[in-house]
Image (spheres, rainbow, N blue to C red):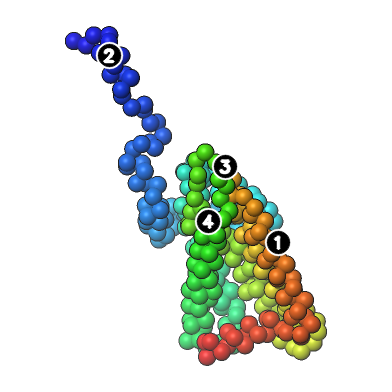
Amino acid sequence: MFTNSMLLTKVETSPPPSPTGVNNPRMQARHTAGAKRYKYLRRILRFRQMDFEFALWQMLYLFIAPQKVYRNFQYRKQTKDQWARDDPAFLVLLAICLCVSSIGFAIVLKLHIVAFFKFLLWVIFVDCIGVGLVIASILWFISNKYLRSSSSDKPQDVEWGFAFDVHLNAFFPLLMILHFLQLFFLKPVIVHDWFFSYFLGNTLWVIAIGYYIYITFLGYSALPFLKKTVVLLYPPMLGLFSLYVLSLLMHWNLSKGLMDFYEYRVL
């Protein structure tokens, strides 16, 4: 039989309960980067478990109000303890958009079937994924190394998965502008040697890349533990505008150069 003093001693020496599972090894394992990546990849072929309606909402609002998209990322952090997406629906829809836009490019460039598949593979694995891996890794390193606030009581790291999600968010408007909207003007206007041709083509490029930079900036500025994220906005925008002015002065048609490059690498 326990005495009162023995009960009191037992209560004082017992560890406090952990309702959130912070001290639970199983819960900690579930929140590791490897576990999150495995869960994400496991769902990539389970279409019935994907929320395509919400992914379409995100794609729409990346054009009209991208700030609202990142508010959802904040909500995910509060409810699921991660910033990165756990639903691959957005990635699947983006892949579909890449395929459709590539068909449009193949028609405009008059590519044969083998060249089309080479073009499609290049767009997906180099332009989207390959470039995204490089940009996401660079910004992930910079943000964790130089932009984290030291005043926080609980230091947090930028998840690499979130950095790649930011790239995918920013890539979608760029894709729609350069691989969809631009197609309607390529043959009738942009490929010619008129001033309006390279003015229109280069302006579309500036809008697309400027959108990419802005949405990338919004993504990192949405993280409350980062500081001075404006360095991801103003210097790149200044460099982009300078390149735009220089391209007009040099009569450099960026869109025509892109078409020639695409034809060169697939033929």
Under mark 3, the amino acid is: Ser
Question: In this figure, which residue is indicated by the disc labeled 2?
Answer: 7
In the rendered image, the residue lying farthest to the right is 195
**Mark 2 burial class by Cα count in 10 Å: few <14, some 14-19, many 20+:** few
N-terminal-most mark, 2 or 1: 2
- Residue 234 is labelled as 1
| Location of residue 205 (image quadrant) | bottom right
Pick the residue in front: 208 or 183.
208
Tag 3 near tag 4, CB within 8 Å = no
Counting residues from the start of the chain, the first of labels 1 and 4 encountered is: 4
In the picture, which quadrant includes the N terminus? top left
**Could you tell me how far apart the alpha carbons at marks 2 and 3 are, in whole angstroms?**
41 Å
**In 3D space, how far apart are the residues under numbered discs 2 and 1 (Cα atoms)?**
63 Å
Q: Check disc 3 and report its element: helix, strand or loop.
A: loop
Along the polypeptide, which appears first: circle 1 or circle 3?
Answer: 3
Query: Height in image: 42 above or below 16?
Result: below
Measure how far apart labels 4 and 2 are at the Cα level: 49 Å
Q: Mark 1–mark 4 contact, CB under 8 Å? A: no
SS for dot 1: helix
User: Mark number for residue 145?
Assistant: 4
* Residue at position x 76%, y 89% in the image: 193
Judge from the rendering whether residue 163 lies leftward or rightward of residue 247; answer left or right.
left
Q: Mark 3 or mark 2, which is nearer the start of the sequence?
A: 2
> Can residue 168 be seen?
no
- The residue that label 3 is drawn on is 151
Q: Could you give the CA–CA distance between mark 1 and mark 3, rounded to whole angstroms?
A: 25 Å
- The residue positioned 67% from the left and 78% from the top of the image is 183
**SS state under label 4:** helix
Q: Which of 252 and 118 is in front in this view?
A: 252
